[in-house]
Amino acid sequence: MNAQALLSIADDELFLGWRESEWTGIAPMLEEDVAFSSIAQNEIGHARALYQLVVGEDGDADALAFDRRLDEYRCAPFVELRLLDWAHTIARRWLYETADEIRIAALKSDPDPAVAGLAAKIDREETYHRMHAEMWHDRLANEARFQEATAELWPYAVGMLPEELRDELAVRIGLALPSDKLSQAHERGTHTEYLAPMWEEMTEVRRSAPAGAQW
Amino acid sequence: MVEAEVWDLLEEIPDPEIPVISLVDLGVIRAVDVSDGHVHIEFTPTFLGCPALEYMKRAIEEKVPGAEVQVIQDDSWSTDKITAAGREKLREAGFAPPAPRLVQLQSQVHRCPYCGSTETHLENIFGPTPCRSLRYCDSCRQPFEQFKTI
């Protein structure tokens, strides 16, 4: 697995983790405040471990996570979207966890034992994210708002995965892949207008002490 | 210092979030090696997003002066690594210990740590830390924290 591919997954987890943490305190019910906080914490933990793997044990994972130029980030447009309603948020959770399961399964058979071992560890934790996403999917599957949100986000979810894994995602979700080539706006490699403000907020304190702060 | 002494010292370090059990009971010390007076300790996190990771690493370094602590990010930890003594301490403190993976995947039975009843239901897959779920006992009407099987 090359470093760019690992960075893609790490950046997805970091930015989606940040997005999910935005529900802390304002989710529709207390139980979901707790759930989204834990999910965010796990996703950001996975990002940290993946960054550490890329930079090596003594490398600076924070620098890799926070000090790149915006055009150097590898996250998919899907995780950048700022979704303000619950139907879209749950639709993204469900689509993301399904796609993530497929790519993590592929990573578990990576020839590099360090990559495969970390993927297996991540997968153990993701089991609980998938249970949560499935629970909500089962509850909302027949609701028009949820179906519309899923249809709207579907091309973005497809754009999260490399070509060779997309058929499996379509089967799992039960939707057809877009018949035409995916629009550039949905593909990894481009960014949405939402990335810059999110990154600025995420790195504001770090950037305020460029010489390095002691916490 | 010999390896057994290092293990004894590590036994004295409580888990920072569930201090009733030690890091050794939690199963996060993967290996201890002492050679030529040099102590090497392999430590593996429970959950990757655990905020206590750095804290535990420092606690080990303070407890075993001069030890080199290596953080291993592989798949060698699961809740099956929690010792039998550790499970019992968890239960006594009101945390339902994680069932062994093979059992849990087949049975889905969760026992109340207070009254022992299996008439319990899930309130939230997530809880105060990533490693815990919230359940409720329908027999003794007590909410409790379930250590997740992973």
Image (cartoon, coloured by chain):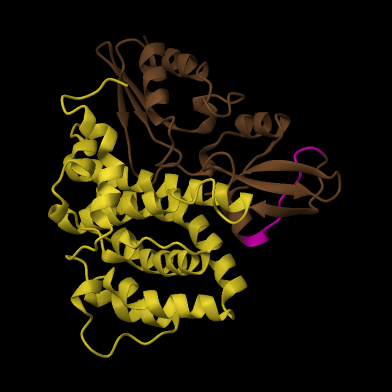
Chain colours: A yellow, B brown
Question: Which of the 4 image quadrants contains residue B73?
Answer: top left
Residue at the extreme right:
B139
Residue at the location (62% across, 54% down)?
Answer: A29
Residue at the location (62% across, 71% down)?
Answer: A139
Q: Position of residue A146 (x, y in %)?
A: 52, 75
Would you say A113 lies left or right of B8 here? left
Give the vertical position of A7 relative to A58 (above or below): below
Count the labels in the image: 0
Task: Decide which of A101, A143 is in the foreground and name it.
Answer: A143
Give the vertical position of A123 relative to B11 (above or below): below
Magenta stretch contains residue A84:
no
Magenta stretch contains residue B112:
yes
Residue at the location (66% across, 46% down)?
Answer: B134
**Residue B81 visible, this orientation:** yes
Q: Position of residue B104 (x, y in %)?
A: 62, 55
| Range of magenta residues | B106-114
Q: Position of residue A187 (x, y in %)?
A: 22, 71
Question: Which of the 4 image quadrants contains residue A126?
Answer: bottom left
Residue at the location (58% across, 73% down)?
Answer: A140
Q: Which quadrant is home to the N terminus of chain B?
A: top left
Q: Position of residue B57 (x, y in %)?
A: 37, 24
**Residue A2 visible, this orientation:** no
Question: Which of the 4 image quadrants contains residue B18?
Answer: top right
